[in-house]
């Protein structure tokens, strides 16, 4: 199993500050016991290897240089791990997960902060 994720460079001293830093196989990403939902995205299975290669390439291109905030919607120009995941999905053309987007935006923002604030595509160039 391979996971792509990101977190604050300030953790644990300043968990809501620093830069958003990406990493492969972070222990917190591999621990499914804390997951709010697990969902297979809607794409053709035949395209899976291509998407994996694109995701890894774009993750490697990310410069770990965007500012981190726990609640990016309240701190313009800042991002978090959900922002990273959503930006990465968008830049490779994968669809949004269905589960969280069934809820109203205010609920999404309170339960999944950063989901509505994806990193821009330029972050992955």
Image (spheres, rainbow, N blue to C red):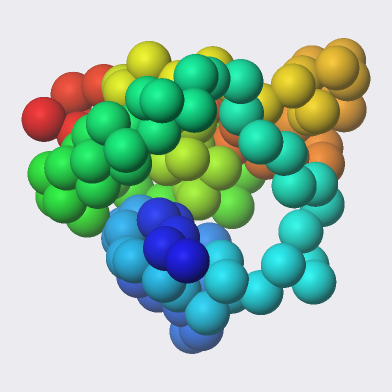
Residue visible at 32% across and 38% down in the picture: 49
Indicate the quadrant where residue 78 lies. top left
| Residue shown at the point (40%, 33%) measured from the top left | 48
- Tell me residue 117's x, y (percent): 52, 26
On screen, residue 43 above or below 115? above
Height in image: 55 above or below 117? Answer: below
Q: Measured from the top left, where is residue 101 in percent x and y?
A: 77, 19
Total labels: the figure holds 0
Q: Nearer the viewer, residue 57 or 65?
A: 57
Picture residue at 47% right of the left edge, 66% below the top: 1
Question: In the image, 26: left or right of 123?
Answer: right
The residue lying toward the viewer, choosing from 7 and 5, is 5
Q: Is residue 78 visible?
A: no
Q: Answer with left or right where residue 108 lies relative to residue 81.
A: right
Apparent side of residue 69 relative to residue 103 in the rendered image (left or right):
left
List the single residue furthest toward the bottom.
13
Q: Position of residue 88 (x, y in %)?
A: 37, 33
Of 31 and 16, nearer the camera is 31
Task: Work out which quarter of the rendered image holds the C terminus and state it.
Answer: top left
On screen, 87 above or below 11? above
Q: Tell me, yes or no, if residue 16 can be seen here.
A: yes
Image coords of residue 28 (percent x, y): 58, 74
Residue 124 quadrant:
top left
Q: Residue at x 80, y 71 (%)?
A: 33
Q: Kindly give the residue lying farthest to the front in the view shown.
A: 46
User: For this view, does 17 lie left or right of residue 42?
Assistant: left
């Amino acid at each position: 199993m391979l996971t792509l994720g990101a977190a604050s460079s300030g953790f644990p001293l300043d968990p809501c500050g620093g830069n958003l830093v990406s990493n492969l196989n972070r222990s917190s990403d591999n621990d499914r016991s804390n997951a709010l939902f697990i969902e297979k995205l809607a794409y053709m299975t035949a395209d899976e290897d291509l998407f994996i290669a694109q995701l890894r390439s774009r993750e490697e291109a990310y410069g770990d240089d965007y500012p981190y905030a726990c609640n990016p919607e309240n701190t313009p120009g800042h991002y978090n791990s959900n922002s990273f995941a959503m930006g990465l999905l968008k830049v490779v053309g994968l669809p949004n997960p269905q589960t969280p987007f069934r809820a109203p935006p205010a609920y999404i923002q309170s339960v999944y902060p950063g989901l509505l604030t994806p990193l821009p595509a330029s972050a992955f160039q």
